[in-house]
Image (cartoon, rainbow, N blue to C red):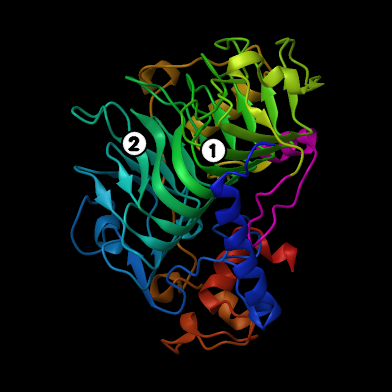
């Protein structure tokens, strides 16, 4: 009998510590926001700290995104929408909430350079677009970098036009990416994500038009209810190395597109320990969602097969609510990415997906799919520029429009600040209560 790899023991240890915490009063442990799930769901970000307003689209200086994320204990809100034209990479500090649903108009996006969360911890990011593009001398960088990082959640984020990969993980742990769009990657690699990290949840994401790595999974990975469309060489990729890796693949939908090979998953070795269940593959490109249930043999045979395990041992502190693969597809179409107001880039990708095999292409250059497009700003609701909460919302909840401390208060004692409550409502989380 094969020995249980050490990573299973490590994942179980993490889980039992958290569960023990819950049983002794940590049942009140606050989710990052009401719909947060997976390994990063308990991040607190900048809760209760300074509210920092991004007031311009400049690369740097007071009121810029770069300045906003340079220090921790902050909740970052946006008084302006549009593209932030970065002139160099941005490093994000720890203990931050970056809440793009606050941005007026079409929302907000970064452009040109990597935004790095490396060496940071305890970060919440929602409703932001990160788009790298063909910036010179950035061919080995990512749109989003996550190295030596921990305790983060990315929700309804669009991550596109990454050069090496759209997302780069290394030596990180306790991270969630949920409800995101990842891809297309561009030259030179055109890849989705290299994940060399443990205790990572990917849930309800759209992986689209990446040549490969949707993701490449080298660590401990929970992969639930994702949709992978129009991969090039390969869709989901195993670690294919001498080290032991573990992954849970449940309820995902793999849909072949015009650029796709027949390999919806592959590049496995026996050191890839894979639990798979209820995954569907649609490989006929006929414009209809009519896939078949994936069999164990579909994941590979012989020396290129993973070690299939019969029990799921990957258990985050906050479980992912499991949908059928078809229901996950519908949710991705309705809401993946920065979807409060989808811009032209994301709308094009969703149109490719819903063509169900007839539309879409892997690309080398954003220009091949119409470029970056335009993201328009707009007007803030009255009062929002003061602390991020409109006066009308304060009055509706019996709060003062003059008190400078209202944003950090908690009028109904549910553990979220008043600012978080308002922004959670914008994001649709109020319906979950």
Residue 326 location (% of width, % of height): 79, 33
Mark 2 crowd level (few <14, some 14–19, many ≥20, 10 Å Cα)? many
Does 222 sit left or right of 379 as displayed?
Answer: right
Please say whether residue 391 is visible from this viewpoint. Answer: no
Region rendered in magenta: 312-333
- Which quarter of the picture shows residue 299? top right
Q: Would you place residue 288 above or below residue 328 in this image?
A: above
In the rendered image, residue 206 lying in the magenta stretch gets the answer no
Residue assigned mark 2: 142
The residue shown at (46%, 30%) is 242
Q: Look at the numbered disc 1 and give the secondary structure of its residue.
A: strand
Where, quadrant-wise, is the C terminus in this rendering?
bottom right
In the rendered image, residue 321 lying in the magenta stretch gets the answer yes
Residue 73 location (% of width, % of height): 36, 73
Q: Would you place residue 194 above or below residue 60 in this image?
A: above
Q: Nearer the viewer, residue 202 or 389?
A: 202
Residue assigned mark 1: 245
Does 146 sit left or right of 257 as displayed?
Answer: left
Q: Look at the numbered disc 2 and give the secondary structure of its residue.
A: strand
Please say whether residue 323 is visible from this viewpoint. Answer: yes
Where, quadrant-wise, is the N terminus in this rendering?
top right
Mark 1 crowd level (few <14, some 14–19, many ≥20, 10 Å Cα)? many
């Amino acid at each position: 009998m094969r020995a249980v790899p050490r990573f299973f023991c490590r994942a179980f240890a993490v889980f039992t510590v958290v569960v023990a915490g819950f049983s002794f009063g940590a049942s009140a442990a606050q989710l990052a926001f009401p719909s947060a799930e997976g390994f990063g769901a308990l991040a607190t970000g900048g809760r209760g700290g300074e509210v920092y307003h991004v007031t311009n689209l400049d690369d740097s200086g007071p009121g810029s995104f770069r300045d906003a994320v340079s220090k921790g204990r902050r909740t970052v809100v946006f008084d302006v929408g549009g593209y932030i034209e970065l002139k160099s990479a941005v490093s994000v500090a720890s203990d931050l909430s970056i809440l793009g649903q606050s941005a007026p108009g079409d929302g907000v996006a970064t452009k040109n350079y990597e935004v790095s969360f490396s060496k940071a911890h305890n970060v919440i990011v929602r409703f932001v677009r990160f788009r790298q593009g063909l910036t010179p001398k950035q061919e080995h960088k990512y749109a989003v970098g996550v190295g030596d990082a921990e305790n983060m959640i990315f929700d309804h984020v669009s991550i596109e036009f990454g050069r090496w990969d759209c997302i780069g993980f290394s030596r990180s742990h306790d991270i969630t990416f949920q409800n995101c769009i990842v891809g297309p990657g561009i030259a030179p690699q055109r890849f989705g994500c290299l994940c060399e990290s443990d205790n990572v949840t990917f849930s309800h994401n759209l992986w689209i038009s990446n040549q490969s790595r949707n993701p490449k999974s080298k660590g401990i990975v929970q992969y639930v209810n994702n949709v992978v469309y129009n991969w090039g060489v390969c869709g989901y990729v195993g670690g294919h190395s001498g080290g032991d890796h573990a992954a849970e693949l449940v309820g995902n939908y793999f849909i072949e597109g015009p650029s796709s090979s027949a390999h919806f998953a592959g590049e496995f070795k026996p050191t890839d320990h894979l639990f798979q269940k209820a995954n569907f593959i649609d490989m006929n490109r006929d414009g209809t969602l009519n896939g078949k249930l994936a069999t164990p043999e579909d994941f590979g045979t012989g020396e290129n097969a993973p070690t299939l395990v019969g029990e799921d041992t990957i258990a985050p502190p906050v479980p992912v609510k499991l949908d059928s693969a078809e229901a996950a597809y519908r949710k991705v179409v309705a809401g993946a990415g920065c979807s409060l107001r989808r811009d032209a880039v994301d709308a094009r990708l969703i149109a490719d997906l819903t063509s169900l095999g007839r539309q879409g292409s892997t690309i080398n250059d954003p220009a091949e799919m119409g470029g970056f497009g335009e993201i328009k700003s707009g007007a803030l609701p009255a009062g929002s520029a003061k602390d991020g909460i409109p006066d009308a919302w304060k009055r509706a909840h019996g709060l003062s429009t003059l008190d400078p401390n209202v944003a950090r208060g908690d009028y109904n004692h549910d553990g979220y600040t008043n600012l978080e409550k308002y922004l959670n409502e914008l994001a649709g989380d109020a319906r979950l209560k």
